Amino acid sequence: MEKKYIETAREVLSSYGFGQGVDLQHLLAVLIGPKATPELCGRLSAKGIQDLADLTEHELCREGLTLTQAQRVMAGFQVGRKWSFVSDEQRFTVRSPEDAYNYLRTKIAYEKQEVFYVLYLNTKNQVIYERAVFKGSLNASLVHPRETYRFAVQHSAASIVCGHNHPSHDPSPSREDIDITKRLAECGKLMGIELLDHLVVCQEKYVSLKEKGCL
């Protein structure tokens, strides 16, 4: 009788003891259960763990999972999120625009194209999630509040800090930067998720739009 894929995945997990040698595809097979296939798990794992963790129950079902399987996968990610909350003391805390700049600088200052990056904070202003939401030339039609705040809702963020880089090395905010900031701030107020700041980040300097009076 042909061995089921979940049996292969369980053997891998037993061999590596859930260490770094276990890939996402095998972990998904164990979560999905006896009907897991290499094709299904491979397709899901190809999305990458960050994008996969952000899929809704409905979106997972559209990928080919049953409702029960989707709930198992979501439960697995939820356990991971709860575990991450245990070590609050290790989280980066944003206390000032300079703190935000020092954090964002390592993420986007050296990018060759514009990247719109969002830090999602808890009530202590600690970073609980982060994500590059958009890449490319930024304009108001691309930086949509729906996408920016979708992850805030998913991760129960109390506030957000946004930042994007200027590959020109000139952090002076454009009219478009200011418009985006005001639009996001207005939407945040309606949702009860405050936009604390929006930074224009370069390798050696930055501009805080909050300090500029745009918030």
Image: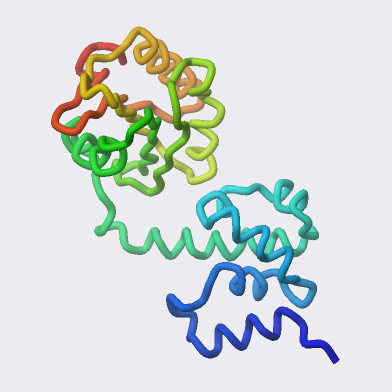
Q: Residue at x 51, y 76 (%)?
A: 22
* Residue nearest the viewer, comparing 170 with 117: 170
Q: Residue 36, image x and y in percent?
A: 75, 71
Image quadrant in which the C terminus is located: top left
* Residue nearest the viewer, comparing 29 with 119: 29
Q: Residue at x 44, y 79 (%)?
A: 19
Residue ranking furthest to the right: 1
- Location of residue 10 (image quadrant): bottom right
200 lies above or below 26: above
9 lies above or below 189: below
Rendering colour mode = rainbow
Give the side of residue 74 with respect to residue 20, left or right.
right
Residue ranking furthest to the left: 204
Give the side of residue 86 with respect to residue 71, left or right.
left
* Residue nearest the viewer, comparing 89 with 108: 108
Q: Residue 210, image x and y in percent?
A: 25, 19
Give the side of residue 10 with respect to residue 65, left or right.
left
- Location of residue 211 (image quadrant): top left
Image quadrant in which the N terminus is located: bottom right
Q: Residue at x 50, y 32 (%)?
A: 149
Q: Residue at x 15, y 27 (%)?
A: 205
- Location of residue 175 (image quadrant): top left
Q: How many marks?
A: 0
Give the side of residue 159 with respect to residue 92, left or right.
right
196 lies above or below 140: below
Q: Residue 212, image x and y in percent?
A: 21, 13
203 lies above or below 213: below
